[in-house]
Image (spheres, rainbow, N blue to C red):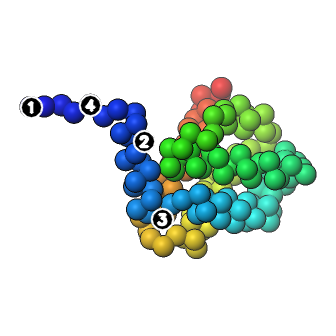
Amino acid sequence: MTVRIRSAEDRRREIQENAARLGIDEAFISDLVENFYTRVRAHPLLGPVFETEIGDHWTPHLATMKDFWSSVAMNTGRYSGKPFPAHMKLTGITPAHFNIWLALFRLTLEELSDSAETVEYFMERANRIARSFQLGMFELGL
């Protein structure tokens, strides 16, 4: 039996080809981020949290989020930050905030995506990220 070891470059190419097959490109990421954060800002629970933290700095925040989701969905490597520490400094965050965030993210994806597979591609990653943050913020007490 031969074991094939994939290089990081092979894996990156596979991820990018799969994303392209699903219709995920930089334009899709941009639309997703812009539409999603429009919903977040209008939400009565999430909006104030983001406004308090981001204030008048939405343009750079949205650019960062586009880099983040480009890296997550297409393995572009455009984002190299550390999102967990930024979220740890937020006060008053509960698991309910994450549930709402995920619901708004799904709603945005369902409106923008051509397929359920694309929605699930993103939601798998979003759920994993949310779970990781919740473990650190609420269960492990980091």
Mark closer to the chain start, 4 or 3? 4
Could you tell me how far apart the alpha carbons at marks 1 and 3 are, in whole angstroms?
Answer: 36 Å
Q: Is residue 21 above or below residue 51?
A: below
Residue position for label 3: 23
Q: Is residue 96 above or below residue 6?
A: below
**Disc 4 to disc 3: CB gap under 8 Å:** no
* Picture coordinates of residue 61, whole percent (x, y): 77, 48
Badge 3 marks a residue whose secondary structure is: loop
Left or right of 33, for residue 131: left
Residue position for label 1: 1
Picture disc at residue 5: 4
* Picture coordinates of residue 34, whole percent (x, y): 71, 62
Left or right of 85, for residue 131: left
Label 1 Cα crowd, 10 Å radius (few <14 / some 14-19 / many 20+): few
| Residue type at numbered disc 4 | Ile
Q: Quadrant of the N terminus?
A: top left
Q: Quadrant of residue 109?
A: bottom right
Could you tell me how far apart the alpha carbons at marks 4 and 2 are, in whole angstroms?
Answer: 14 Å
**Is residue 127 shown to the viewer in this render?**
no
Could you tell me how far apart the alpha carbons at marks 2 and 1 are, in whole angstroms?
Answer: 25 Å
Could you tell me how far apart the alpha carbons at marks 4 and 3 are, in whole angstroms?
Answer: 28 Å
* Picture coordinates of residue 42, whole percent (x, y): 80, 65
Left or right of 113, for residue 34: right
Q: Residue at x 40, y 54 (%)?
A: 17
Residue position for label 2: 12
* Picture coordinates of residue 115, whole percent (x, y): 44, 71
* Most foreground residue, 109 or 73: 73
